[in-house]
Image (cartoon, rainbow, N blue to C red):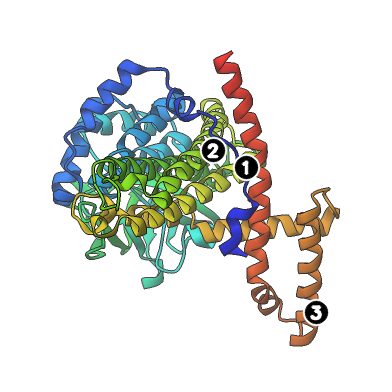
Amino acid sequence: MLCRLSTHLPRRASLGLRTFSTSITNDTEWEQNWESQVSTVSGATGSYEESADQLRDISKSGVLKFTDLRDNPSRFFAAHRILAERSPILGPGFWIRFTVHYNLFAGTVLAVGGEEHLEMLEEVQKNGELGCFALTEQLAGVNSGLVVGTKITWDNDSQDFLLESLGDGANKNWISQGLVGDKAVVLADLHVEGKSVGPHAFVMNLRENGALVDNVSLEDMGGKTVGNDLDNARIHFNNVRLPKSAMLNKYADVDEATGKYVQKIEGMRTMEMIGQRLFSGRVAVAQAALEFRRKLFKMTKEYSDNKKCWSPSGNPVLSDIPQLKALYEETSARGDELDAFVAICEKKLSMCLQEEILPPLELTEAIAVAKIRAVDESIEMCFRLKQEVGSYALMAGSGFEQMDFLQCCKFAEGDSRILMLKMARDRLNVYKKKGPSGDEDEDDLCKIMLSSIQSEMDRNGGDKQAAFDSEWESFYELAGLVMGRVSKSYLQEAEQDAAAMTA
């Protein structure tokens, strides 16, 4: 059951791995420089135009280069963590703006762009231009398995592309930085010679000389509970002409002479490399959730350490109240575990990023587990903390007013529920094909679920979807078991790494 998910996760004493997590960069001078760059970010107190200008200045400084995602990923992840440390004060807006610009926009160009696109990326950073990432749509996006309804067609006669939103359902939705961005990476279903060859990425000017380009319309998504220093746009493309150079063509292209679609590297799909951005994003999101939680607890403990309470004998401070004291100790131990787990995921993914290869399936599953656990446990612990400190949690500046930062984390880079369902479905399919794996709890649950699904299908005339829906609780329970197994394996590796560092 989802509500009992934490019972499947290993509990260990504090490993002292907070130092291990933050020392991955081993680059103190750079971290100090980066902290200085982001120290003046206004966050929730500013407008989205002001927030965008602040990111322009930070990006233009070159302290963090777009290419660091590939060449020095430890800096890329450290930059996200350092920004997230301030999230209980700043809220989620600037952190999201930052990761959209560096990971989703620039990271996608870096991953699937050709040489001319990499040169363009240098100019974008030099000029302080901003980019957005137009994937999610009103009826499709990350949660639908990267389904894309926006259409782009190669016109061989005019030697350019025609980009169009096929109805309101294909409008790009919740596009962060869409109202101020200068450029956009757009995911669209590419049609060549009358046939779809699947979603591909294109880079386009969203604005020229400050003005929105022709045949593109924007709509503000409206006010939010938090993060109103971040602009979110709905984008509609009405027969926009894009030059041949718009296609990010490292792995696939259209031959200008023949008008045919060409796969440059056999077996390497463009969307697989774009998926790398989801993996790096999930690690960054996991770390951000942990940093938010850590900072919120630190701020609250500073308050409760000095808040005296009445007692028949003396005046204890609020931090000494047993339930609050126990909560502080629990979150410290659980946080150490997750720091270690996420740090191992970062290390392994960084190797793949530097070598420009796809991560193995076991790592992508571990990254999904890390994202889900870090976010869900942070939501749980922060909510419990809120219940223990009374009216303090209602005070502006306490950090509790920014807790929807964690809600943003929950659906960012793949909704946690969807990731869990995929995890359970994949495990069930492995059991169907290969039989028992040796993990008794998972194998037993898979056997029961398959039997129940078949029985339900026999009763309802073969409606497979209805049968699967009837077992929804079991799917989440199975995902919990998988997460516990993966976590245990990675924590063992983290312990070994920590031991090696202190030897």
| Residue 272 numbered tag | none
Q: Secondary structure at mark 2?
A: helix
Foreground: 220 or 485? 485
- Residue type at mark 2? Glu
Q: Which residue in the structure is indicated by mark 1?
A: 487
Sequence-wise, which precedes: disc 1 or disc 2? 2
Q: Secondary structure at mark 3?
A: helix
Foreground: 274 or 418? 418
Q: Position of residue 365 (x, y in %)?
A: 62, 46
| Residue 145 in the image: above or below residue 397 | below
Q: Which residue in the structure is indicated by mark 3?
A: 455
Near mark 1 (Cα within 10 A), the count class, few <14, some 14-19 or many ≥20, is many
Foreground: 436 or 422? 436
The mark closer to the camera, 2 or 3, is 2
Exactly how many numbered labels are in the figure?
3
Q: Which residue in the structure is indicated by mark 2?
A: 337
